[in-house]
Image (cartoon, rainbow, N blue to C red):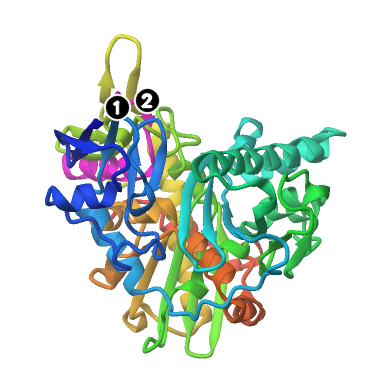
Amino acid sequence: MKHEIEIIQDGESISIKAGDGEVLLDVLRTKGYNIYSPCGGEGTCGKCTVHIIGKGTVAACRYIISEDITVILPGAGEMNVLSTQYENTVDIDFMPFYDARLSGRPVGCALDIGTTTMVYYFIDLKDGTLLRTYSDINPQVRYGADVISRINYCTENDDGLETLQSLLAGSVNSNIRRLINDTQRKEDDIISINIAGNTTMLHLMAGVDPSPIAFAPFTPVFTEQKNLNPSKLGININEQASIKMLPSVSAYVGSDIVAGLASIDLEGYETCLYIDIGTNGEIVLVNKNKIFACATAAGPAFEGARISCGCPAVEGAINTFKEGYFTTIGRTDPVGVCGSGLVDIIAYMLDKGLVSATGEITDELEIFTDGKKDLRITQQDIREVQLAKAAISAGIDILLRRGGCCYDDVELLILAGGFGNYISVDNAMRTGILPAELKNKVIQAGNAAGTGALLALKSREFNHQLDKLASRIEYIELSADREFAKLYVDRMNFE
């Protein structure tokens, strides 16, 4: 039986036929598509990901064709990011820790809990094969776009913590059911989950009061690795499974940063910057034998919050913009503008003189309208971007000063996270989000936090390295730094 496969890449679409039971990666290779698969299609690297409309992101080497589908392939820019990420990931020996008595078909899950999105990586613990990758919007977004909103909900409602914890557990259970349906596994086969996330998300997942994070001296209840019982969290897996919260540094530098930084091979570099611009903007300076970190309130604008036409990176989000033309995720009708598209639009407005150096606009820029939806950039949107980019720039300056170095000393700038994955580096520098002094020194590492959680699942030694790394990082609280406020104001204007 033949199925119709519509293939979309860089805006162009063709249709081909494929047989029932064929592997998608093999079909794409046969048709001449160069899908990045450094492991040769063995299912161990997780880089041959494609997007299937209605099903989400899948590993092409593990997807068996059984129906008509529409496949969106990575563009040239995304392929470069995947290649860069793989080349800069540390090498490990596959030595997972699990009890073989728990299941004959053991499955592990690496979970990256972001404030806006959650990403799941399921692997076969016998050989490291990537079984499935799923992503979801964090269901807590209905209670606020940032961690402070979530914490406030917990403190203002008697059942607030229970509500937010159950939402996360519900998402985990939903994606476990997806895995079971897709791979014919059982709940009892899932015997290990490693979780990376910001410190607030870890507390909420664990059902631990996060309120101390929001108030000085900003002391979380825990930062160390924490092993939890699945039944106590309401997660439906093997009752003897291990659920591990990976180690954090402070209230605002979580295990997502520790895991992400640990996943990058920095051998041969003395001074590097690591930036993850998610809902929270975390920055790390690795300087010889010292590591400094800080967090800035930069991310909500780039995750779609506080922008009039903003949205997360979901299907229909405008993700690129050039000379008045745009693309959307999934090539569907636009529903809003996500972070990477917003940066492109602001850079375009600066180039065309539609925004002054101080951030004043001559008129609102209409991006899309169809009589029902009106997407445009307003004066307040520009102000939100200025606030975000000023926070990042000032945070970088503080870390460089604390490390006793300057931009010339920085050998590498690592951009992590979904936003860092797809952002145009040139446009980020044009808008001042990233320092232009570091042009040609940038690598885009993709979801490094998820990669780190996955490596910790595959290697006991890597897991131990996370504890060592977390203990070496010195956290700088910017609200207590006298220089930060002045630098923040100084960096508000566009260059």
Residue hosting label 2: 335
Q: Secondary structure at mark 1?
A: loop
Visible in this render: residue 8? yes
Mark in the foreground, 2 or 1: 1
What percent of the width, then of the height, locates residue 73? Answer: 25, 45
Which amino acid is tagged 1? Thr
For disc 2, the neighbor class at 10 Å (few under 14, some 14 to 19, many from 20) is many
Main secondary structure of the magenta stretch? helix
What percent of the width, then of the height, locates residue 289? Answer: 53, 90
**Quarter of the N terminus within the rendering:** top left
| Magenta residue check for 350 | yes
What range is drawn magenta here?
333-353
Residue drawn at 60 percent across, 67 percent down: 482
Q: In the rendered image of this protein, does residue 107 appear above or below residue 299?
A: below
Visible in this render: residue 485? no
Residue drawn at 62 percent across, 68 percent down: 481
For disc 1, the neighbor class at 10 Å (few under 14, some 14 to 19, many from 20) is few
Q: Secondary structure at mark 2?
A: loop
What percent of the width, then of the height, locates residue 334? Answer: 32, 26
Residue drawn at 41 percent across, 78 percent down: 272
Distance of label 2 from label 1 (alpha carbons): 9 Å
Front residue (pair 388, 23): 23
Q: Quadrant of residue 362?
A: top left
| Magenta residue check for 141 | no
- The disc at residue 268 is none
Q: Quadrant of residue 156?
A: top right
Badges 2 and 1: C-beta atoms under 8 Å apart? yes
Which amino acid is tagged 2? Val
Residue hosting label 1: 332
Q: In the rendered image of this protein, does residue 383 appear above or below residue 433?
A: above
